[in-house]
Amino acid sequence: MKEFQIEAVKPPKLVGVEVAEKSWKILEHQILVICNHNKSNHSLDLEELDRNAYKMAWHKCGEQPYSGLVSILTSQLEKIATSLEDYDGALFLEELVRKWTAHIRAVEVIRHVHMYISSTNKTKCTYVQIIRNVHMYMDGSYVRTERTPVHELGLDLWRDNIVRRFKIQERLKYALPELVQRERRGEVINRGLMSNFVKMLLFFGTPVYRNVFEAPLLNVSHGFYRGESQLLIKSRGCGDYLKETEKRLSEEIERVSNYMDRMTERHLINIVVDYMIQRHVNKLAHMKNSGFIGMLMDDKYEDLARMYALFKRTPNGLGVIRKGIAAHIRNIGTQLTEPERLNDPVDFVQGLLDKRDKYDKIINLAFNNDKMFQDAFNSSFEHFINLNPRDPEFMSLFVDKKLREGLKGASKEEVEIVLDKVMRLFRYLKEKDIFEKHYKQHLLKRLLANTSVSEDAERSLISKLKTECGSQFTSKLQGMFIEVKSSGDTMKQFYEATGHELGDGPTLAARVLKTESWLTQSTTTCNLPSEILTVADRFETYYSHSRKRRRVTWQTNMGSADIIATFGDGQKHELHVSTYQMCVLMLFNSGDGLSYKEIEKATNISTSDLKRCLQSLACIKGKNVLRKEPMSKDIVEDDMFFFNDKFSSEFYKVDVGTMVEFEFEEETRKRVKVDGKHEIEAAIVRIMKAQRALDHRNLVSEVTKKLQSRFSPDRVEIKKRIESLIEREYLKRDKDNSELYRYLK
Amino acid sequence: MRRASSKKASSNSTTSTNSSAMDLFRSATGKAATKELERIDQLFYSYSNESSGMIDPEGIEYLCSDLEVEHTDVRILMLAWKMQAEKQGYFTLEEWRKGLKALHADTIVKLKKALPELENEVRRPSNYVEFYSYAFRYCLTEEKQKSIDIESICELLELVLGSQFPQQVDLFVQYLKTQVDYKVINMDQWMGFYRFCNEISFPDFNNYDEELAWPLILDNFVDWVKSKQS
């Protein structure tokens, strides 16, 4: 900053208007010079300016300069405008900016002059202030204080003569967006220039900014992104397309923050989202192989997360994905539960657990734990898990296997994790009481055969079931544990009391259970071997003696025994057998070559049980402790049985298969016939949904047709299902036509 | 016998909650009508329960004895229908007003006189279906209840259809009491039976076709009757 000395100015001689006019002419000229000159000379000009201005002020000639200023500036701007028309493209913009910068400076100077001229009381201090302001301005610090009238004048004149001038405006409206487009296409542009322009426009207010810059920009942006999206959608897979979109979005945001006003960000984002995503939402989501289904199958978490984030910006995008995924899960789930596909129930349930885990992970990693997605997943799972009426049974089988073998050696935490996962599937079941029924049977089997891996695990699961379903659900189950435990105590007491009397007889391990909680089948008995009878009778006496009014009945179809058998070459094996098997085998102590009839008579076992029992003893390789003549798979009344001296096994202990186990598994596997209720109902709903209204006869025939590949539905069952649907307000009868049903939902 | 009506101090029947409605009511109708409404309200309060503001079962019993009608009489049910009463055993002020105004009865005497006419009105075929379905709904006491137990259904059938289709009702009630498949009856089955009585020839059931959309319970009923007859 140049040093400026304040000289005492001698008041000039009082002159007339001519002097004023002369001074004005000089002033005018100097202003023009300033308007056209560069910065470097300004300080010098200023000095001159001041002196003349001072003179004018002294002569109290305030009015003239103001209107004079207007005309000077206007004519100057005219000239600038015309000259600008000769420029084009980037040069046009650069020139415009240059002129603008100069103009701003000129305005400041003029303001200074005007202030000087129009004030009548000039003190030295004021003078100094003015000079200081001007210098600051000249140095380039555009400190916007309150707008003085001259300031306003200068800006208004610029706006009216340059910016609003049609030809210039048109060029601006074209050139500015053009630069942006170039940048979008990958070119490097002069961002400083853009920034200056935007600032200039904003100077004139938001409407000018919007009109001259933002609106044309949005216009071309529409076109750009329309084209871009159409091009990309044809050539890219969904994942790549979304990556591109994400890139474009962040580019636009960055661009705005760099050289536009913040208000434009929202509009640009909307355009990108609209063209790139909104208009192709369905196409993208359902794109073959690369759409969300492909992503789900291949666990593409990153792509899914990106899709989620981008679709979230649209009003309905998330809904599309959500519905699509829910339908997808329902489909694959329904396929999984198709009866023909079910080979191993345990594998099936494991598959379900795995699926649940997979989708859990996806919701977590890709969908931000979005609750609506979780709800959609849950309802889809719930839907297909309840399609197959045997699912509750399968789940019980799965749990059974885990508690028998799967959790062997697992740590407490591992057990808890598995059980919690099972509980999650359990919650989806509609027919929880069927699960309970099977679970009870399986638990019974486990308790009796003592095959449970961990009592803690059993209890843990029961308490989880209790939390879920209430204590009523589990009270019987808990009772079972208690009874088994107390049976152990009873046995101990029994042997303490009578053990000495029994001597070398077989050791009895009886489990005393209350009839109601355990038995689903009726009581069966058979003739026990004498050795067993002794100790059994003893126990009976003991028990009824110590607990009055309680009767003990032996459930011979549920017991097991460990017997030591000596074979031909002195080989001994310990055989684990069912009670029935034991009864049969013990017969061979007193004779060999027994006929079926003899065995039946001696043991008094029921026919079907006996046949199964003999089959398991004589017809299974590796476990044939008996020989049958003739050698065949089925047991008939004329068969003869012999003790198999030649039996051999690499193990000392041989499990010949307890009856209980055999029976239960048979039971489960035998049941092929599917209870058609669900199928019929689903068929009715599907048909009515499509037809909206249908009369009874036709509905019945349609349903029958639809299900004919699976089974032939019972007419009565169909009616039952229709009535159930009427009650649940899926259907209603037509008011006037009693044969007509209408679909409601 | 009327209960001692000393409970209400003034004869002014407007209560604080209803005063604005009452005013509107009054201003909309003529003076004679206003008088009638007043009397209707007064009649209400002579049977209603102080604390609940409604006529409860006890009040209905008194009403019935004043009307010289058994409280199990179908005409009380018809009255409830006329009032479109929602809760079984209770009448609200609004319901009472609605019913009695429609019957032009503002005293017990007039109400009693209105009963035979009411009966005729209800028994008109176009109205009877509505009344019949109303009777079922009226018996649903719990919020989400959709069906009624067999015993109550039997009573209701007697009450509502006993005079019109005595033989069908008798047989059906017999069937319901002996069968074990159904423990409750829902609206669809209830309405089905009415249609059955109207359309199917009795006692041969010759035009009954179980291949049609009749509710299953009626299929079973017809089977049962036929096997009984053979």
Image: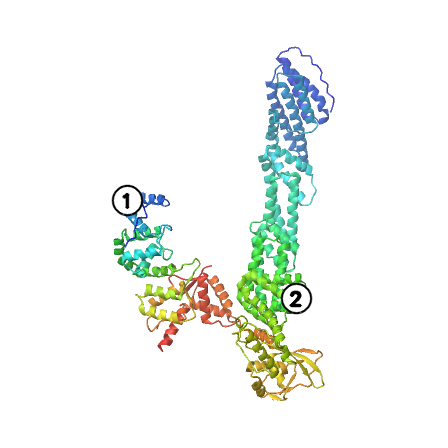
At label 2, counting other C-alpha atoms closer than 10 Å, the crowd grade (few under 14, some 14-19, many 20 or more) is some
Residue at the image point whose x is 37% and y is 57% from the top: B88
**In screen coordinates, is A223 left or right of B20?**
right
Whether label 1 touches label 2, CB < 8 Å: no
How many angstroms separate mark 1 from mark 2 (CA)? Answer: 86 Å
Q: Is residue A446 above or below residue A304?
A: below
Of badges 1 and 2, nearer the viewer stands 2
- Secondary structure, mark 1, is loop
- Name the spot of residue A432 as percent of width and height, x first: 54, 65
| Residue at which label 1 appears | B30
Residue at the image point whose x is 68% and y is 31% from the top: A98
Q: Is residue A495 above or below residue B133?
A: below
**In screen coordinates, is B105 left or right of A107?**
left
Asked whether A100 or A401 is in front, the reply is A401
Query: What's under tag 2, amino acid-wise?
Result: Leu
Query: What's under tag 1, amino acid-wise?
Result: Gly
Task: Classify residue A119 by image quadrant.
Answer: top right
| Mark drawn on residue B197 | none
Asked whether B87 or A340 is in front, the reply is B87
| Mark drawn on residue A407 | 2
Q: Is residue A261 above or below residue A290?
A: above
Asked whether A115 or A74 is in front, the reply is A115
Asked whether B22 or A17 is in front, the reply is B22
- Name the spot of residue B60 as percent of width and height, x first: 33, 56
